[in-house]
Amino acid sequence: MSLPNDVWLQIIEYMSPLAIQELYSVNSTFFNVAMDQRYQQISFSYLSRKMIWILARLKDPVVAKRVRILHLYPHFVKDALDTMDLSSSQSLLSKFGELAGLIRDQKKLILKQKPRLPLKFKTCRDLMQVMMDILSALPNLTDYHVLWCGLPSVGSDPALVLSSPLRLSLRSLRLEVSLEKLQYILSSSYTQPLPQLEEIDLFIRIEHLHFERYDTILLMLARMISSLCSSLRKLTVQLWEPFDLSPLFAAISHLPLLDKLSLSIPMSFPNLGNPDGLIGFLNAHSNTLRSLSIRASELGGRSLMTHNELQLGTWMDETFSRIHLSCLTALEISLYLVPFDSALLCVRTFSTTITSLVFTGSHLAYEDLDLLTAALSSRRHKHPLQSARIGPLTLSPQLVDLFADRFSEIDKLELLVKSLVPFEGDVPLFCGRSNSDRDQDEGQVRRFIEEMEHRHYPEWKLRYLDLSSSSYPRLINEEQCRSVFSQCVPALRTFT
């Protein structure tokens, strides 16, 4: 049966990737979709037969054009140095010994022999040259992810391979590298202009090897970022451990298209360094930044041993109290590790402009939500809050009253509900032996619904309500909850 290509594509949308792979021989549409799924994301890390076979396939332009995302971790350079180059430096006597052993066992191995590899390399340099040629010829590559830290024995050699995709028309670049390794990548990229990247994601580590060069490397990185002034829209900055990034922020030129910034702040001193650097950078982009994401981290180094919530709060208060972003409309704060008071200060700072808020990561009591909603309703707004994602929390009728009063103009509200109680201050009751299968007491949920039946919010403009929960017996009461909220909120159109 012959069907139009568009119809086959619609059928494929309802199939799992594994099923599509098995049906690649049905027709050309299935074949192309299966090949796209197989090669759209490629990862090279350790030297293996599989890696060499994939490299050989990528020499075919028909296959190379399917690659969209590339991940590189240059352990393959170390593997090649440890095998190919080591083998080439063996003595003549040892090579004759190995040859004799191979001849003796040839009859035993001939039936078990694996297919010959399509590519052969005598030295690590040969492997790197082939990879450079292949990786610089992926015409539709858009997202490039680099992981490079440690591996002290390989020196700067991997930089030649890692920088080769930078010749392509990339959209996004993620660098999870140490400062020591970053200088090699940046030095290699100086010989050619960078593509017009729209997104850069920096995850910086430190190997504590060249302290005297850190400021120089940060200035090199700042020049690289500044060179993207005509394209960069999103910047993400994350540190493995506390480090002074103020020279980086101070040296980045104005990026007129930058509208999204994501910051991950280490828990311990010096956090992200001198606040003046970040303050100056943010205020310089007051007229362009529209989305800001803030979270704290304790991934490595001193943060694991000496993190201090009070110290982080002090740093955040000093920093964000001096920032003015006149065009900011979306604010996301993860409360995991971020002190509530500091998060609340950020909300108050940007409350006059934001129309979208994500405030999640730590359980919020009624008193916390009272302060949060007050911060967003007591200030004069250019535009009222349109969407919010908040929680986890314990939902009570009194809390619903609070949201209806303070967020009367909101269009979409997502609440991460940990439990339901009929009256504010009640203790949630659960049944079940383990955390994985515990359900909330159905009587409490039923009484919550009964209390809500007596409420009516005719002025509430809420059209979309999502009560996300794994605690209360969702399947039993979802229809009841939908019915009662539809009655309470006349404007409601969608409940999930």
Image: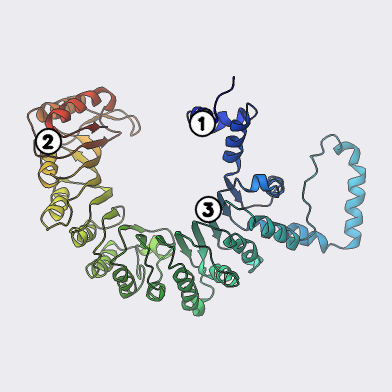
Left or right: 256 with respect to 416? right
Q: Quadrant of residue 234?
A: bottom left
Alpha-carbon span between mark 2 and mark 1: 49 Å
Q: Quadrant of residue 3?
A: top right
Q: In this rendering, is residue 424 above or below 93?
A: above
Mark 3 is on which residue type?
Thr
From the image, tell me which residue sits under label 3.
142
Q: Is residue 341 visible?
A: no
Mark 1 is on which residue type?
Asp
Q: Is residue 407 visible?
A: yes
Q: Quadrant of residue 137?
A: bottom right
Specify few, some or many for label 1: CA neighbours under 10 Å numbering under 14, 14-19, or 20 or more: few
Specify few, some or many for label 2: CA neighbours under 10 Å numbering under 14, 14-19, or 20 or more: many
Location of residue 116 in the rendering, given as x and y in whole percent from the top left corner? 80, 43
Which label is found at residue 6? Answer: 1
Q: Earlier in the sequence, mark 1 or mark 3?
A: 1
Q: Earlier in the sequence, mark 2 or mark 1?
A: 1
Location of residue 119 in the rendering, given as x and y in whole percent from the top left corner? 77, 50
Alpha-carbon span between mark 1 and mark 3: 25 Å
Left or right: 391 with respect to 78? left
Q: Quadrant of the C terminus?
A: top left
Residue at 84 percent across and 62 percent down: it is: 90
Front residue of 469/278: it is: 278
Q: Of the residues tagged 2 and 1, which is closer to the observer?
A: 1
Front residue of 195/315: it is: 195
Q: In this rendering, is residue 320 above or below 14?
A: below
- The residue tagged with tag 2: helix, strand or loop? helix
From the image, tell me which residue sits under label 2.
397
Mark 2 is on which residue type?
Pro
